[in-house]
Amino acid sequence: MNIGHRIKSLRKYQGLTQKELAEKVHKSPQVISNWERGYTPNITNEDIVNLATALNVKVSDIVSSSNDDTRADLPPLTPRDERDIAKDLEKMLAELDTSAAFGGNLTPDGEDLELLKSSLTQAMTLAKRVAKQKFTPKKYRKEP
């Protein structure tokens, strides 16, 4: 999925028209349309940051080069969801017996722990987004 499709998908998920999004990022609706259709190949970093702010998503959600089309269709996380994930992750890491998790007699170094934390964060984020899509009743979904 290219950046234009991600912008369009995120805009529609937020229930915004091209005109409304254009007002939020201080651009014309035609510019938004060109971005979504891929007519403007290079979007400035400033515009991407403004889009992320207007759409209440992370910059990485817009510029991600992931080929996984299903992820773009998942609902974004709220700040509360992100706090819950961070809290659950810290609890999980505190309860983890690191020597058993890393193969018995081995003692993990900082890099191993950071890789574990990063992997768990990605997995928990994806699981939360899938759960939000699956278990949110249709009447509460923000779909146009």
Image (cartoon, rainbow, N blue to C red):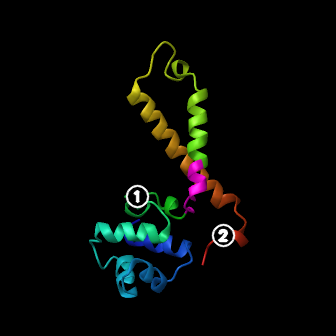
Q: Amino acid at mark 1?
A: Ser
Res. 6 in view: no
Residue that carries the numbered disc 2 in the rendered image: 141
Report the side of 131 relative to 76 (left or right): right
Q: Amino acid at mark 2?
A: Arg
Res. 18 in view: yes
- Residue 77's disc number: none
Viewport quadrant of the N terminus = bottom left
Q: Residue at x 50, y 66 (%)?
A: 56
- Residue 60's disc number: 1
* Of callouts 1 and 2, the N-terminal one: 1
Q: CA distance from mark 1 to mark 2?
A: 23 Å
Crowd class of label 2 (few under 14; some 14 to 19; many from 20; radius 10 Å) = few
Horizontal and vertical percent position of residue 86 = 55, 44
Crowd class of label 1 (few under 14; some 14 to 19; many from 20; radius 10 Å) = few
Horizontal and vertical percent position of residue 103 = 50, 18
Q: Which residues are magenta?
A: 74-83
Q: Residue at x 49, y 22 (%)?
A: 102
Viewport quadrant of the C terminus = bottom right
